[in-house]
Image (cartoon, rainbow, N blue to C red):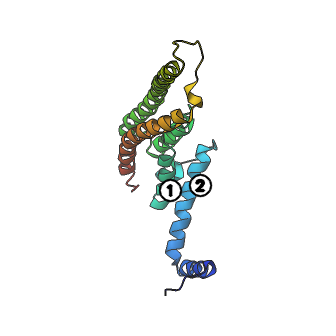
Amino acid sequence: MTEIKSTMEKVLERAASMGSASREEMQADVQLKEGMRMAADYLQGTEVDFSQVVEAKNVSGLLKRGLVLVFLRNISLPRNADLQRAERAMQGLLELAKGSGDLVSVFRDMKNILDHYQKHLKEIRQQVEEAFRQQMEQALSQQTGQKGLGLKIDPALHPKFQEEWSRVKVDLDDQYNKVLQQHKELVAQRFSVAL
């Protein structure tokens, strides 16, 4: 019978392996995290001077990688109508690239994708609500034998609607995320960063 390791044993093994990290690996980790911290500060609205990253020859590629990864991670489909975080991330990447023309067109496309997603999401939701409302009214009229009872039916309150809407939204999100991911990969290639 195999022996099951306790949580404490696993923690001790992990700590031992972390202790064996070389000095270079620890410095690389510090550089990467510094880039991530700079990007997070920038996204929070703090003024960050990227000139040291863009112009300095001795700046680690890991610092830039940390910046790029955080910015790309923040370009995503909006959960609400707010695109400010994604726009700020695109602006940060433009500053890193010194306003490179090829990225301007990629970001314009990304912005259009995000705008179109919001409009499409709203339209699809209205269509699903209307189709569900009609189904509910038809079912009600079959049960009562009367048509047009004048009841206001809110399909969003019905659990079946939530299931259907959730399924439709996941499909829509998948479609838009694929296109957005292709654009992110172009940006990552521009910065020579692997996603």
Camera-nearest residue between 191 and 108 = 108
Is 182 located above or below residue 150 in the figure?
Answer: below
Camera-nearest residue between 87 and 129 = 129
The amino acid type found where label 2 is placed reads Arg
Which residue is pictured at 53% across the width and 70% down the height? Answer: 27
Q: Where is residue 172 in the image (x, y as percent from the top left)?
A: 42, 36
Q: Quadrant of the C terminus?
A: bottom left
Which residue is pictured at 53% across the width and 86% down the height? Answer: 3
Q: Where is residue 9 in the image (x, y as percent from the top left)?
A: 60, 82
Is 82 located above or below residue 186 in the figure?
Answer: above
The amino acid type found where label 1 is placed reads Gly
Which residue is pictured at 45% across the width and 40% down the height? Answer: 170
Identify the disc placed on residue 37: 2
Total marks in image: 2
Is 65 located above or below residue 185 in the figure?
Answer: below
Q: Do the residues labelled 2 and 1 touch (CB within 8 Å)?
A: yes
Camera-nearest residue between 157 and 60 = 157
Task: Identify the residue under disc 1.
Answer: 66
Q: Is residue 128 left or right of residue 179?
A: right
Give the crowd class for mark 1: few <14, some 14-19, many >=20 residues within 10 Å: many
Lower position in the chain sequence, tag 2 or tag 1: 2
